[in-house]
Image: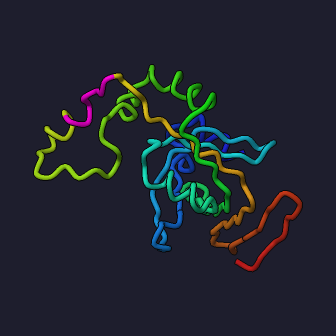
Amino acid sequence: MELGRATQDRHHAWRTPVLATTAEDGLPQARTVVLREADANTAHLRFYTDGRSAKVSQLSDRPDAVLVFWSKRLNWQLRVRVSVTALTTGPLVESVWARVRQSAAAGDYLSHLAPGTALSAATPTEVRSIAAQPTEPRRHHVGVLDAQVQEMDWLELARGGHRRARLSADTWEWLTP
């Protein structure tokens, strides 16, 4: 229920979880992502990214990842173990681009520079200018991360006592916090 709300409410704390993946060198990598869709019926979460980002190649090599959501208002932490499919082409990607291209975020996916590209000694103004320059033809780099939920670990922190539960497709069990 809260995850569904987070896709609609830009101010919901769970809209921007941390996604942890495993890099090619075996070390963990974590970054904030924006939750775009949550489907409770299919246990899927969806995120958009630049298809050239490191997380796309990391997830293509090792699709298992963890999302960590924290809500200060609720005092809830939700850790979600997922298996992620990273898509950079196809009907779903084009459908997402059709929605994104009309938004202010469109420029993020039109840069000729991949995320993390070194900009040598460029100033911040030059960086914005370089990143905004279109390539010919103007190609988008939208990627979609489709995360199948495997298991959730919910923790509530409360003065009267903490509560914790593990949930999966066929299991619900209370745990010691």
Residue located 53% across and 23% down the image: 99
Say if 91 sits above or below 125 in the image. above
Q: Which residues are magenta?
A: 130-136
Q: Is residue 52 left or right of residue 118?
A: right
Q: Is residue 40 left or right of residue 6?
A: right
Q: Quadrant of residue 141?
A: top left
Number of numbered callouts drawn: 0
Tell me the quarter of the image containing the C terminus: bottom right
Magenta stretch: includes residue 131: yes
On the image, the x and y values in percent for residue 9 come to 56, 37
Q: Is residue 128 left or right of residue 7?
A: left
Residue located 61% across and 56% down the image: 74
Magenta stretch: includes residue 171: no
On the image, the x and y values in percent for residue 163 come to 72, 71
On the image, the x and y values in percent for residue 32 come to 46, 54
Residue located 68% across and 73% down the image: 162
Say if 56 sits above or below 98 in the image. below
* Of the pair 123 and 8, the residue shown nearer to us: 123
Say if 90 sits above or below 2 in the image. above
Q: Is residue 131 left or right of residue 76?
A: left
View extreme (bottom): residue? 176
On the image, the x and y values in percent for residue 131 come to 26, 36
Q: Quadrant of residue 157?
A: bottom right
View extreme (right): residue? 170
Tell me the quarter of the image containing the N terminus: top right
* Of the pair 88 and 17, the residue shown nearer to us: 88
